[in-house]
Image: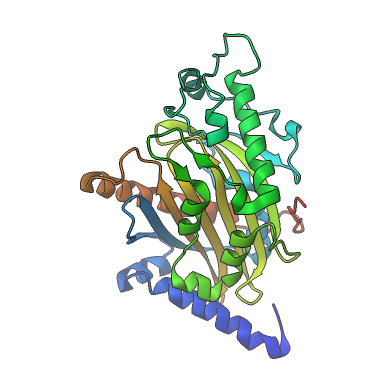
């Protein structure tokens, strides 16, 4: 807590952020929040393939415990969905990906890949390497080795060049420039830029905007999402002193995903307010859809599913945050 002349600005920043978030929900939602229920709503977007979902829940947690939870990427996903996870050094090293084991379904799909047609999301340079031999074949282009090289390359390019190092995807009839799509996903609601301007500034300009006040870390993950396994690479940015000092913010920026998402950003904020604490969770994603839009019933079903998942994530994270910190906060900085 900042004291003296700084106390009022800190309180004002927390109040403005808290009020802005509450303004996105109805009066009935606010009553449910006071009872401890998790809230979730979908915010309208112009792009039919984009989804913005906002969630909030009361938590029984200290700032130190929030830092502890945010520094552990393993806890960001449900335990029953998480298959594998590994930290990535800065700079990235080959052995960072040594434990990775390609999912059997992806190995099969990679074996059938052809340039411009592949079930697994492949950047332009990597798509030129197909066809990929199956695990029963011989050679250096086995699916597991191929995916390890893909993840390593993506990490190296981003860590040195930032968004400019993100690839062009040509494995579908419609090419996708990852940097352009991610730039749109980073356009969060106005109140985020107003109260947490450092988040977008840092994510837009990384690595040029690297700061001692932000803890950057990287990790790869294999998880079960919907019906398919998803291999992903993520840049995490932890802001230990957000909204004036007492809030803690965590941004998770997707650098690669093998299925479902062209781009995705998660923003979690721990907000202490008037003797209570709250967890804000905002996700903006653009779907990897072979068509340029969802049909209305697909969109409706997707929104129902996304809200249900958000409420589940909030409940799970609130449970993890409950109780005292188990150790003194340790930086997760990788550079």
Looking at the image, what colour scheme do you see?
A: rainbow
Placement of the N terminus among the 4 image quadrants: bottom right
- Comparing 33 with 144, the one in front is 144
Seen at 57% across and 13% down, the residue is 135
Q: Is residue 274 visible?
A: no
Instruction: Identify whether 173 is placed above or below 306.
Output: above
Q: How many marks?
A: 0
Instruction: Identify whether 35 is placed above or below 114.
Output: below
Q: Quadrant of residue 250?
A: bottom right
Seen at 56% across and 52% down, the residue is 253
Seen at 45% across and 72% down, the residue is 190
Expressed as whole percent of the image width and height from the top left, the position of residue 148 reads 64, 29
- Residue at the extreme bottom of the image, as rendered: 5
Expressed as whole percent of the image width and height from the top left, the position of residue 90 reads 75, 46
- Comparing 296 with 178, the one in front is 178
Seen at 47% across and 73% down, the residue is 191
Instruction: Identify whether 238 is placed above or below 97.
Output: below
Expressed as whole percent of the image width and height from the top left, the position of residue 271 reads 56, 69
Q: Quadrant of residue 3?
A: bottom right
Q: Is residue 224 visible?
A: yes
- In the displayed structure image, the side of residue 237 where residue 105 appears, left or right: left
Expressed as whole percent of the image width and height from the top left, the position of residue 85 reads 63, 37
């Amino acid at each position: 807590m900042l004291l003296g002349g700084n106390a009022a600005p800190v309180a004002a920043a927390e109040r403005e952020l808290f009020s802005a978030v509450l303004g996105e929900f109805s009066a009935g939602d606010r009553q449910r929040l006071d009872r401890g229920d998790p809230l979730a709503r979908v915010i309208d977007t112009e792009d039919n393939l984009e989804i913005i979902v906002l969630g909030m829940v009361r938590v029984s947690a200290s700032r130190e415990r929030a830092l502890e939870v945010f520094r552990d990427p393993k806890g960001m996903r449900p335990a029953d969905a998480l298959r594998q996870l590994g930290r990535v050094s800065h700079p990235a090293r080959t052995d960072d990906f040594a434990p990775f084991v390609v999912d059997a379904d992806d190995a099969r799909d990679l074996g059938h890949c052809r340039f411009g047609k592949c079930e697994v999301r492949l950047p332009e340079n990597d798509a030129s390497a197909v066809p990929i031999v199956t695990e029963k074949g011989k050679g250096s282009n086995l699916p597991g080795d191929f995916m390890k090289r893909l993840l390593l390359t993506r990490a190296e390019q981003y860590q040195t060049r930032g968004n400019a190092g993100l690839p062009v995807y040509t494995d579908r009839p419609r090419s996708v420039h990852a940097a352009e799509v991610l730039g749109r996903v980073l356009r969060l609601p106005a109140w985020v830029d107003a109260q947490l301007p450092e988040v977008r500034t840092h994510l837009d300009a990384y690595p040029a905007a690297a700061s001692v006040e932000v803890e950057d870390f990287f990790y790869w993950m294999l998880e079960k999402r919907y019906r398919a396994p998803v291999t992903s690479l993520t840049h995490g940015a932890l802001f230990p002193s957000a909204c004036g000092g007492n809030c803690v913010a965590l941004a998770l920026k997707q650098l690669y995903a093998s299925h479902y998402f062209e781009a995705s950003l998660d923003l979690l904020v721990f907000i202490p307010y008037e003797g209570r604490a709250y967890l804000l969770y905002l996700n903006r994603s653009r779907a990897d859809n072979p068509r340029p839009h969802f049909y209305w019933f697909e969109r409706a079903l997707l929104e129902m599913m996304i809200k249900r998942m958000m409420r589940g994530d909030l409940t799970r994270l609130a449970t993890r945050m409950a109780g005292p910190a188990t150790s003194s906060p340790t930086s997760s900085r990788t550079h």
